[in-house]
Amino acid sequence: GPAGAVPGALAAVLLATAVTAAFAVPVATVEVRGLFESVRPPGTDTFAVLTDVGVLGTIVAFALIASAESLFSAAAVDRLHTGPRTRYNRELMAQGAGNTVCGLLGALPMTAVIVRSSANVQAGARTKASRVLHGVWLLLFAALLPSALALIPLPALAGILIHAGWKLIPFRGLVTLWRGQRGEALILVVTAVSIVAVNMFEGVLIGLALSVVKTAWESSKVKLEVMDKGAGPVQVHLSGNATFLRLPKILDTLESLPQDRPVELDLTALHHLDHACSTALSHWAERHSGADTPPVRLTTR
């Protein structure tokens, strides 16, 4: 019926606004300033701060976080529909162009938001025009009906965001993720808690840092095989990626080898050998090659 054609979120906002206005409930409402008053292009003195290393670091951090959030949102939205897939390069180029304009107008940087995008999908959007029209409606309301927006209570909008975000959480998928990849699940939980406890910017930074550490750890897997036939040299084969993260394991194994036996160290199966590991292996070979022990035979690609 006609009632079903009205989105639930819109009905909730209208009802909350009506109740707040009717009973004069003392809650914070949306604050809308004059559209043209908000446009404040930066002056020439503003560009002087670009020589500050701290400012440049903040710019890079914002760019990385905004890009990551947009890519995460695009990937999540692609799972909500069966239409055309996101072209990520074009998405980032558009975001960069838009943020350049935002900077010239003195506005806040923009980024994709999963809640707003999912609202478009749930409302039946089929093309990318929905994203443009979304911005057009916001612009028209801010320019022509600021007094109407000022009646909307902020708790109502917060409730809609929580509800929309809650529906996006794949609880069954989380159980599967925990059973299969607990490292990924732990990063997800820590990121979510950090966003709620601190703020979104620092929470995403924490999540990205944990992901980088996890990826570095997993990509540095190395396998050591020691073959000791009781006579002749001890053969040691290393394969995988030898990085400083696995250096303690490598050195512990090598130090446990008999000091009075020759050693053949085969590195031909290594995909990557970083400088720290290479230096440590050379020093170990020098120490192991004593006066009564033949030099370590080191084989590389």
Image (tube, grey):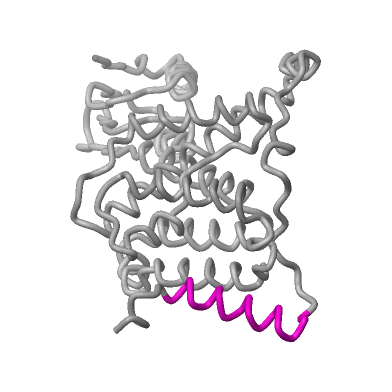
Instruction: Say if 111 sits above or below 31 in the image.
Output: above
Please tell me which residue lies in front, 271 or 261: 271
Left/right of residue 236 with respect to residue 41 in the rendered view? left
User: Residue at (50%, 30%) from the top-left corner?
Assistant: 98
Q: Does the magenta stretch include residue 186?
A: no
Q: Which quadrant is home to the N terminus?
A: bottom left
User: Residue at (64%, 47%) from the top-left corner?
Assistant: 202
Residue 214 is situated, as x and y percent measured from the top left of the image, at 44, 45
Left/right of residue 185 with respect to residue 124 in the rendered view? right
Instruction: Say if 212 sits above or below 77 in the image.
Output: above
User: Residue at (22%, 26%) from the top-left corner?
Assistant: 269
Residue 279 is situated, as x and y percent measured from the top left of the image, at 48, 18
Residue 75 is situated, as x and y percent measured from the top left of the image, at 33, 48
Residue 291 is situated, as x and y percent measured from the top left of the image, at 45, 14
Q: What stretch is highlighted in magenta?
A: 8-25
Please tell me which residue lies in front, 177 or 192: 192
Left/right of residue 1 with respect to residue 161 in the rendered view? left
Q: In which quarter of the image is residue 59?
A: top right
Instruction: Say if 239 sits above or below 138 in the image.
Output: above
Q: Which quadrant is home to the C terminus?
A: top left
Q: In which quarter of the image is residue 261?
A: top left
Give the dominant element type of the magenta stretch: helix, strand or loop.
Answer: helix
Q: Which residue lies furthest to the front in this view?
A: 144
Count of number-bearing discs: 0
Please tell me which residue lies in front, 31 or 18: 18
